[in-house]
Amino acid sequence: ASAAKSACSTSTMNMARMRRHSIPDPRSAGAVPPAMAGAPLLLRAFLAADKPVLAICRGIQLMNVALGGDLYQDIKPFEHVPHNDHWGKIHTVTVRRDTLLSRILGQDTVLVNSQHHQAVDKVAPGLVLSALSEDGIVEGIEKPDAKFCLGVQWHPEWLSAADPAMQGIFDAFVAACK
């Protein structure tokens, strides 16, 4: 599971540069690293081949934009709970019932960490909303017609050692990879 955690948390895409119509936030300035330039194509190839996908933090943002959704470039103006610079559990996320995420976590709410200033705005066609924070920020999306395609905005890899529900995300992903 640790290899899956490492592979899933290495996404460093500058999402402000992915969408031409987006207004880049100064904190997102800079070029897309060459290693990430092909990430949207790779994501679409994985989905076309029905390979499992787990997207964490910027990964959920990449997944949403690559499949036709939009992002809030800066959530600070309308956030009511802290979303940035919190490594430990800081806010509650409500999980929608009858979703992959709800089946994995086995609970309606979870306490999560938060390390982002951008977030999913319009959910891409073909994806469904699976979790929201207390202030309405999208915290989970998934593709119900895929073998396994889940994106979460928080960092479950930082919580999984002490939280079996968070470890369950990785266990489910690894099981889907077999």
Image: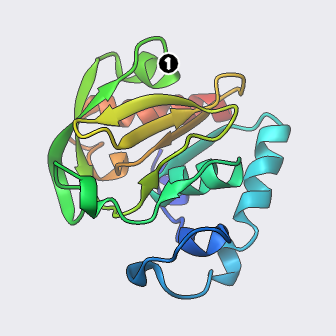
| 89 in relation to 26, above or below | above
Residue 159 in view (yes/no): yes
Q: Is 99 placed left or right of 19 in the picture? A: left
Q: Nearer the viewer, residue 77 or 145?
A: 77
Query: Number of labelled discs?
Result: 1
Residue 95's quadrant in the figure?
A: top left
The residue at the point 35 percent across, 51 percent down is 155
Q: Nearer the viewer, residue 109 or 156?
A: 109
Percent from the top left, x then y, of residue 122? Answer: 54, 44
Q: Nearer the viewer, residue 101 or 14?
A: 14
Q: How is the image coloured?
A: rainbow
- Identified by mark 1, the residue type is Thr
The residue at the point 84 percent across, 39 percent down is 48
Percent from the top left, x then y, of residue 22? Answer: 57, 68
Residue 175's quadrant in the figure?
A: top right
The residue at the point 18 percent across, 60 percent down is 86
Helix, strand or loop at disc 1? loop
| 68 in relation to 123, above or below | below
Residue underneath mark 1:
99
Residue 170 in view (yes/no): no
Residue 91's quadrant in the figure?
A: top left
